[in-house]
Amino acid sequence: MPTLLGVGDESWLPEPCRRARSVVLLVIDGLGWEAIRSRPEQLPTLSSFAGGSISTVAPSTTAAALTSITTGVAPAHHGLIGYRIRVDGSVLNALSWRFPDRAPPDPSSVQRVAPFRGQSVPVVTKYEFARSGFTQAHLRGGPFWGWHTVSTLIGECRRLSDLGSPLIYSYYPGVDEVAHQYGLESSFYESELSFVDHMVKELLSVLSSDTALVLTADHGQVNIEPESWLGLSAVEDLVDECSGDGRFRYLHSRRGRAQDLLATAQDAYGAQAWVRSKEALLDEGWLGPTPTPAVIRRIGDVVLAASDSVAFIDPKLPGEARLRSAHGSLTAAEMEVPLLAHRGLRA
């Protein structure tokens, strides 16, 4: 984000976005590099873009990664360290911005870093996100242009570029939604990829040749079969609460039981996950450098980061096990995302 805002070296960006009059950044939720690499028949337009893959952040999940995209800092700094986050003694759903037992917190108190380096960047995302707490946490500060249909996403990006906005942030969630509902091996997922490619082609056709379309994603995906959602019965007597994601599960221990929890989790799940204590997670820099005190408080005493095609069920969120794809961990399929660019095609 700092580079797209003109701060820093442009040399690592794909060539089409260098020296562009305007840049449209399109974030396609859930479109990992593996999908682009392995499905060129569904993605011919994207396959023609310049660029390649880059790494997302850990955990490789929407709340953490979108906030890193817009703020330019790691989760250790911005503090949105998962789908569900333990904040002030309760677990906050970062996407719906809800506590189970009380009113939600002020977004700016949970995520204090100004998005877009404090600049006023127009945001083009779904209309219903306008008043959400998560929108305030990771997109606050600029004009909001909500879209109801994909045609209006395309039209708003064209309008804002033609008006001279140097940077426009746009967001499309469909790939992630279809993957979660149907899995990565379904005809629905293939159809969604083809639809996204058509959307990108249409967007290119209306953007002027001095405008760059830059495409990235927050994370990739791993296909999860129903039987691959694993319960936590082996550690339930040692766990006070869970947070995080199915593939990056924070375990908050009962008082005084953190070491017992770590040893038991390693024995029970070490063959299917990277099992780390909070201290090891911090020492190894998984969430980024120099975590804030608030972030340190939010991390579970033990983390299960899935290494196989499995996910771990939070007993308080059993419905999560209906998802047919998941993300959050450190595998290449989840961590590698596109950074692609192409100039607009309108003369």
Image: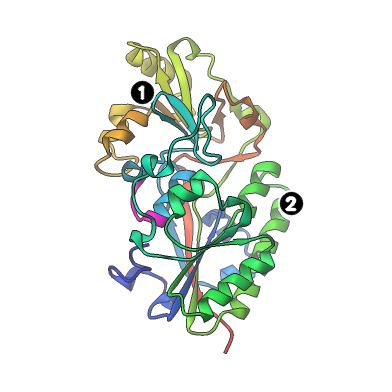
Using the image as rendered, state which of residue 103 and residue 177 is in the foreground. 103
| Direction right: furthest residue | 187
Indicate the amino acid at tag 1.
Answer: Asp
Q: Is residue 173 visible?
A: yes
Residue that carries the numbered disc 2 in the rendered image: 188
The quarter in which the C terminus is drawn is bottom right
Toward which corner of the image does residue 222 lie, by quadrant? top right
Residue 205: say if magenta. no
Toward which corner of the image does residue 205 lie, by quadrant? bottom right
Using the image as rendered, state which of residue 98 and residue 198 is in the foreground. 98
| Direction bottom: furthest residue | 347
Secondary element under disc 2, as helix, strand or loop, is: helix
Q: Is residue 184 visible?
A: no
- Up-down relation of residue 199 to residue 252 (above or below): below
Secondary element under disc 1, as helix, strand or loop, is: loop
Residue 136 is labelled as none
**Pair 1/2: label in front:** 1
Answer with left or right where residue 191 lies relative to residue 1: right
Q: Position of residue 136 (x, y in %)?
A: 47, 49
Q: Which residues are magenta?
A: 70-74
Residue that carries the numbered disc 1 in the rendered image: 301
